[in-house]
Image (spheres, rainbow, N blue to C red):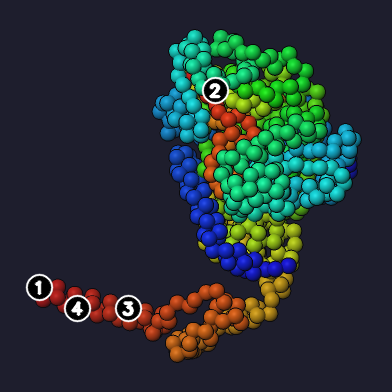
Amino acid sequence: MKDSRRLVLDKLKEHGIAGDTSYPAYSHPHTGITDPREFFRSVVESVGGECRFVADLEAARKCVAGSEVFLAAKEVCSYVKEVAEGNFEAEAKADAHQCAEVDLTIIRGELGVAENAAVWINADPLRHRALLFISGNLVLVLDGRDIVPDMESAYARIDFSRLRSGYFISGPSKTADIEQCLVIGAHGAKSLLVLVVG
Amino acid sequence: MKSHARLAAAFLKQEERAHWHDQALWYVREKRDRMAASVPDWEALRETAQAIKRHALANLPRYLEEFEQNAAARGAIVHYALDDAEHNRIVLEILKGRNARLVAKSKSMLSEECGLNEFLERNGVEVVETDLAERIIQLAGERPSHIVLPSIHIRKEEVGEIFHKHLGTQRGESDPTRLTRAARSHLRERFLAAEAGISGVNFAVAETGAVVICTNEGNADLGNSLPDLYIAVMGVEKVIPKSRDLSVFLRLLSRSATGQPISAYTSHLLGPRPGQEMHIVIVDNGRSEILRRERFHKAAFCIRCGACLNTCPVYRRSGGHSYNYIIPGPIGTILAMHRDLKKYKDMPYASTLCGSCTAVCPVKIDIHRQIVLWRNEVVEAGYLGRAKSAALKTTTLGMKSTRLFRIGGWAVRKLLRILPPFVFNNRLTIWGRSRNLPKMPARSFRAEFRAYSRSKTDLSESRMNREARS
Ligand code: SF4
């Protein structure tokens, strides 16, 4: 096995790539976005999610409390206690498999990207990162000041030095594998609500 | 092995399906166009993406080592495999070492290339494909017909049949939502039971040791977070230098692939989750040879978006199974030829050389140019076949001599006007079997042009005369 490593690396030393092979200097800001918040909202909706602007966490709480998903949910796991108490403590479970019945998870996003509605989630504080995918529905709580226009500005803000896992989530899970008909809710969340606070 | 032309003809016999296939893919292509047009710097992004690939692949040993060190520092165990057999062996050993007999797998073209599933099944490991399309294909016992939309050739009624047989859904069910829900609960149960997860990799970041995976369904994430054993398999070409480079590739990938601004999930995994064992298998399997061939090395830049398939007029009309290589369409063609020139000799001819693939490719691979060059290689290697070779030789002769060309042209113009069409459109003429000839002009181009220049001089002369008079 050690040998294969050396062999592969040696084989790759020779190559036929012609021309300039220096690392390019680049910057491609998305210049078409004048109002990142509004742009973000419209893209969230175009990818099958829902986006609400709320003044503060109290307003966010009301918004969630009145939502159909919340009213129908039996097990709610909340990492933003100001928004909902929740009745399921994923942190108290030894194994992610025990979270399989969670209907709704409420969690903070660190960044929202206007150009593609992606919300960056640092999963390191979670005992079970699987919760993000196993939960029936998701509510992401985002600070209004954390919306950036494009992916380039997003990556400029993410610190990978200690990160173990991070996710961009853009809308609910989906598939179009049967005759290209879009079906929301493949394996992951069946609905996704982004609450932009402030 | 049947040729592309034969397999395509079989696909086209089912007219309704073939038409639907063509339209569905064209719709995806149009979505891609709208998405591309909405990003102001699209062309510059493509240029940058290619420049990053050029740089990364010219310095692969360095970046692979950097990636390996960083991934290992985060607790991942890194393996190298020279070829498909070694890749399969490594994966099996890891699974056996942990006594894993049920694997939740998410889509990976590399594992298709290596025949991993069959190998594992032969060795007593049950592999469950968890991407919906891959699962459909697996239950149907077929192979993917598209690299991003593996089951695009299967209609919903057929999915209903397959699910009725294997998942016990109601007979005659063909509603996509209800079928998807059935697959969700069936696969959920498998996810919870799986002892290991296997997935492909979209990008591997040297700077951090991160493995980046893009999916819409969330299947890869259940597979890499639930089980205590996770194996990521990747080709050597997946490494990019910096995290920042992801911004370039992610902005291009989903927009090119399905016309989405980004996939629903883009996961960055830096080492295993607490309590988990994570392996990364880095595979060459012919990639170093591709990179060594100057004329063809760009084929290794591919990020597997599938845009060149969606846009290809031949692929859309002939279906993925008409190509004998596991990866179909334009990119499949320029990859297959590296594998086996003789076996896949007909693939470069399954092209109109229209260049649409090259025009949409997010990393600007000169796909159609490579296809032409591969035709050269096929001819040079003597694999063209006698009929086509003879036809080409005759044409070359005619093209080389002005006199022969003129006589030939005259004869063809005369003859084709008198001969009935079946002389040309019959089963024995390879070209005319499925094509019609255009109407023959009365005069040759030369004669036409001479007449035109004469009339032009006449015209300008008469205009001059007129102007002189006035
Ligand atoms: S060759 Fe280009 S267009 Fe085709 S799949 Fe690869 S990256 Fe996409």
Is the residue marked by circle 4 packed among few (<14), some (14-19), or many (20+) residues within 10 Å?
A: few
User: Marks 4 and 2: which is nearer the front?
Assistant: 2
Q: Which residue is mark 1?
A: B470
- Expressed as whole percent of the image width and height from the top left, the position of residue B341 reads 73, 64
Of residues A173 and B396, the one drawn nearer to the viewer in this rendering: A173
Count of numbered labels shown in the rendering? 4
Q: Amino acid at mark 1?
A: Ser
Q: CA distance from mark 2 to mark 1?
A: 87 Å
- Label 2 secondary element: helix
Q: Disc 3 or 1, which lies upstream in sequence? A: 3
List the single residue furthest toward the front. B171
Q: Label 4 is found on which chain of the structure?
A: B
The Cα–Cα distance between marks 1 and 4, rounded to whole angstroms, is 12 Å
- Check disc 4 and report the residue beneath it: B462
Q: Specify whether B273 is left or right of B37.
A: right
Q: Position of residue A131 (x, y in %)?
A: 67, 24
Which kind of residue does numbered mark 2 sit on? Val
Asked whether the viewer can see residue A152, the reply is no
* Pick the front one: B342 or B425: B425
* Quarter of the rendering containing residue A127: top right
Disc 2 marks which residue? A69
User: CA–CA distance between discs 3 and 4?
Assistant: 14 Å
Q: Which residue is mark 3?
A: B453
Q: Are marks 3 and 1 on the same chain?
A: yes
Query: Residue B353 lies in what quarter of the image?
Result: bottom right
Reply above or below: A186 against A83.
Answer: below
- Tag 2 and tag 1 share a subunit: no
